Structure formats: C-alpha cells, structure tokens
C-alpha cells in the first residue's frame, strides 16, 4: 500500500510530551476507520511508525493522532506544524470489539498514552450510550502534568452518564484526584464484574497489571481486550516484524482478547 | 451495625457469628474533610472500613508538609498496625473529602481474636490480602508502569 499525502490542519500540544495532529488527505478522500485501528505515519526523510487513530470514528474528513515524542520518527511527527505534509498508510488492524460490550457494564482502563487509542471507544460508547450498562473510565498517569485530554475528561465526568476517575503516581500541589497506580481505582467501580467487559490500553507492563486487577475482581480473561504494540514495518502481514508467537500484531491485532495473548505477554523472547 | 458491616466488601461472606463479634467492636464515624485521621508514631488503636469519601496516606516531610503517597476510598480499609506489636502507626492519613467509615476498635478485636482463633484467622487472612494488594501496587509504582 502506497502512502497517501496528508496535510496537518491543526497541531494540539498535549500534556506529557505529546501532540495531537489533526490531518486531512490532500486528495480529499477520507477513509473511515474503526475504534482501535492505526495508521502508519511517515515523517518524510525520517521514518514510518504505527500510530493509533485517536479521533471520533463518526467525524468524517479529518484524522486525529496523538503522538508521544519518544524517538526520531515520533519527534519528527510531533514537530510538524499546520500546512506541513506527511505520508499515511492505513487504517490497519483489528479494532476494539465495542459491540461485544452491548448490554454489559464496561471498564476502560488507560495508562499514559494509552488513553489515545481508547478515546474513539469513549466517543462511540457515549454516542450509543443506551446500548451499554455502567461505563467506568479509569485513567492513570505519572504526574498531573502527564495526564492526556484533561479538559475532555472533565467534560465527560460532568455528563454524569460515565464514571471518570483519574489517578497519578506522584502527587503535586493542587491535584485533587487520586494518588496511586491506575489499578487502585478498581474498587471505585461498583457492579457485577462477572458480566463486565474490560478494555485496557497502555504500555505492556501496565496492561499486565490492569488485566490482572480486572481478573482479580471477577472479569473473565476472554472479556478483557488489550491493544498490543510491536515494531512494525509493512503493516500488511508481509515482513514478519510484528510477529508475536502465532500472531501478526498488524493484522491479527493490535486488539486481542487477553485470554489469547496472556501466556506470551511478558515472555522476554517474544 | 451488623447491616453496615455486611455492606462493606472487606467483611463479605463472613458468617453471622463472626459478624456479631465484629459488630461489638465497631462504630460508625464521620470525619470532616481535612481532618488528620492517623499520626505516625501514635498508638494504632483501630482500623477503618471506608464507606464513603477519600483518604490520603502519606508522611509529613520537613519543608514540604503532608506528602501524599496514595489515596484510598469507599470499599477499602485503612490501617493494619493495630494487628501487630508495637501497635503504632507507620504513616499519616488525612481525610481529603468528608469521610464516612466504620471504625473497629483494635484492643476490643485483639481480645476477641485471642479468645476465638477462628475470628483471628478470618481477620488475618483478609488483612494479608489487603497487604498483598498494597505490595502489588508498590511494585507497579516501582516499575513505572506508564513508561514504555
Ligand atoms: C499498533 C500501534 C499503535 C500505536 N499507537 C501509538 C499512539 O497512538 N501514540 C504513540 O505515541 N505511539 C503509538 N505507538 C508506538 C509508536 O509506534 C512508537 O513510539 C514509535 O514507533 C517509536 O518510533 P521512534 O522512531 O519515534 O522511536 P525509536 O527511535 O524507534 O525509539 C525511541 C525510544 O522509544 C522506545 N520505543 C520504541 N518503540 C516503542 C513503542 N512501540 N512504544 C513506546 N516506546 C517505544 C524505544 O525503546 C526507544 O527508547 C503505537 C504502536 C503500535 C504498534
Ligand atoms: S508489520 Fe510486517 S508483518 Fe506485521
């Protein structure tokens, strides 16, 4: 698949060394996507990296990506300014299975940059609010200054039909939320965990802790969805870069049921 | 009191005999936001089963004041130092919001546990679980789970 040129329409500086790029295809042909899918973003002259789509799947025309500046390619992408161009391939990958949560309670567990790939799920569930039971969004970050989308979190909390809890590892003056890792928010979620669907996104170690804490409270491992990250190159099951045991993360994932991948997550060689 | 105990997850699935024993040592408390609940070094005379509100655990650090290490809330319990000698608090705790909690008297419980090993076993098991969870949380903090 050949990259299509997109132009940066807006650049939003987020907290925690992250930037949201709002981009538009220069040929005007916007491609629909599903929550949890990713694009390969090519910073010309630097490199191409997989980045999840963080916008609203029902908002056509623009594509949102929230990028954490960690290395060469992500830094080049975060440095783009309105009017500049980048290459885009995608969308790729197996999305979050939002429909599997219909009629059930939902826990969305996000750590660090992991809130970005989960944000489309929040948009989608709020747009279809009546189809789900209690929805709890539990968000953790290192410090208050690392928390993504604080204004949106506040607005969601004020709606009253979604429970939004935030926590930070390190307390700072003025912070009125919780202090502790994201799993410490679990006791705040009421309801029957045995019929809850969990969505967990963040660094892999956080997802391990997150999945375990959901299971400790009675959620079945097959009712927990996680989004895995592996190095990628082709994103179309050709190069083998993203191979993870029997799976290709680019096409079998990035979203998996925890029960399918748990034995392999944390194995050093994979 | 027994009904309030039953509602709290920490006391879930206890038989009625055990609940009666615990109820005899329990009382309902309301603690205003900002109040200091535990003082490091003070005698640990009780534990709290939180029904509502948020409590910050931490320490007083010279020059920085109260430094929060973690917060706990409804459905959780505060304090296990009443179970072990020297029965002293190792940290401070402050109410961050108005708190409603069941406070259970440590001396009363210890006497009942000595007389009834079954009660002692139930309580020790439950506190061991709380401690295991706290250790897990500390491990997660130390490995910095938000760092890719
Ligand atoms: C399906 C998928 C979706 C993703 N979605 C997002 C997203 O929405 N937002 C976002 O910011 N990132 C996302 N990532 C991660 C992103 O692709 C990497 O951060 C990026 O590839 C790093 O490239 P780089 O050239 O900037 O850094 P490199 O120069 O390759 O690495 C620099 C540093 O970053 C670390 N690093 C490398 N790969 C990753 C990784 N996968 N995650 C975190 N740190 C890494 C390296 O260990 C090194 O310390 C996603 C990854 C996948 C597989
Ligand atoms: S990235 Fe090439 S096979 Fe998945």
Image: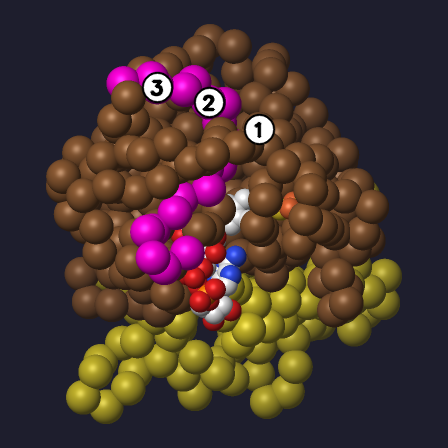
Chain colours: A brown, B yellow
Q: Secondary structure at mark 2?
A: loop
The residue where tag 3 is placed is A30
Residue B144's tag is none
Question: CA–CA distance between discs 1 and 2?
Answer: 9 Å
Given contact means CB atoms under 8 Å apart, are the residues at marks 3 and 1 in contact? no
Q: Nearer the viewer, residue A264 or A25?
A: A25
For disc 2, the neighbor class at 10 Å (few under 14, some 14 to 19, many from 20) is: many
Determine which quarter of the picture holds residue B93: bottom left
Instruction: Identify the residue at image location x=50%, y=23%.
Output: A34
Instruction: Identify the residue at image location x=82%, y=65%.
Output: B121
Please give left or right for residue A158 compared with residue A236 in the image. Answer: left
Could you tell me residue B3's position as x and y percent?
A: 61, 36
Look at discs 1 and 2 and give the one toward the viewer: 2
Q: Which residues are magenta?
A: A28-47
For disc 1, the neighbor class at 10 Å (few under 14, some 14 to 19, many from 20) is: many
Magenta residues, dominant SS class: loop
Residue under disc 3 on the same chain as residue under disc 1: yes
The residue where tag 1 is placed is A95
Given contact means CB atoms under 8 Å apart, are the residues at marks 1 and 2 in contact? yes
Q: Is residue B29 visible?
A: no
Q: Chain of mark 1?
A: A
Q: Within 8 Å of ligand 1, the CB of disc 1?
A: no
Could you tell me residue A21's position as x and y percent?
A: 26, 41
Q: Nearer the viewer, residue A41 or A52?
A: A41
């Amino acid at each position: 698949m050949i990259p299509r040129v997109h132009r940066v329409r807006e650049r939003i500086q987020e907290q925690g060394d992250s930037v949201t790029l709002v981009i538009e295809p220069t040929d005007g042909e916007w491609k629909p996507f599903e929550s949890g899918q990713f694009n390969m973003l090519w910073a010309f002259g630097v490199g191409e990296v997989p980045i999840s789509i963080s916008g609203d799947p029902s908002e056509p025309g623009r594509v949102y990506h929230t990028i954490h500046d960690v290395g060469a390619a992500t830094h080049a992408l975060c440095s783009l300014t309105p009017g500049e161009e980048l290459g885009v391939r995608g969308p790729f990958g197996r999305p979050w299975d939002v429909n599997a949560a219909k009629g059930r309670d939902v826990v969305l567990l996000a750590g660090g940059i992991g809130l970005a790939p989960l944000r489309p799920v929040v948009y989608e569930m709020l747009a279809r609010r009546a189809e789900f039971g209690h929805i709890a969004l539990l968000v953790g970050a290192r410090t208050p200054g690392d928390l993504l989308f604080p204004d949106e979190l506040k607005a969601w909390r004020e709606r009253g039909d979604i429970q939004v809890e935030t926590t930070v590892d390190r307390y700072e003056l003025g912070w009125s939320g919780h202090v502790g890792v994201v799993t410490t928010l679990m006791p705040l979620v009421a309801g029957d965990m045995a019929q809850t669907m969990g969505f967990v996104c963040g660094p892999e170690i956080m997802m391990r802790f997150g999945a375990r804490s959901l299971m400790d409270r009675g959620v079945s491992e097959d009712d927990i969805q996680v989004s895995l990250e592996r190095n990628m190159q082709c994103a179309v099951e050709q190069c083998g870069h993203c191979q993870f045991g029997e799976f290709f993360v680019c096409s079998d994932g990035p979203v998996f049921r925890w029960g399918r991948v748990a034995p392999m997550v944390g194995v050093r060689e994979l | 009191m027994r009904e309030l105990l039953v509602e709290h997850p920490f006391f879930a699935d206890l038989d009625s005999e055990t609940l009666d024993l615990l109820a005899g040592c329990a009382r309902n408390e309301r603690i205003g936001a900002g109040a200091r609940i535990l003082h490091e070094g003070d005698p640990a005379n009780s534990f709290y089963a939180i029904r509502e509100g948020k409590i910050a655990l931490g320490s007083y650090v010279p020059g920085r004041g109260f430094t929060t290490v973690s917060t706990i809330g409804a459905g959780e319990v505060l304090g296990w130092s009443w179970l072990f000698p020297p029965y002293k608090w190792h940290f401070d705790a402050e109410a961050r919001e108005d708190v409603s909690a069941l406070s259970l008297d440590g001396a009363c419980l210890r006497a009942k546990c000595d007389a009834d090993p079954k009660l002692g076993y139930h309580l020790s098991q439950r506190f061991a679980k709380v401690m295991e969870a706290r250790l897990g949380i500390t491990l997660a903090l130390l490995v910095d789970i938000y760092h890719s």
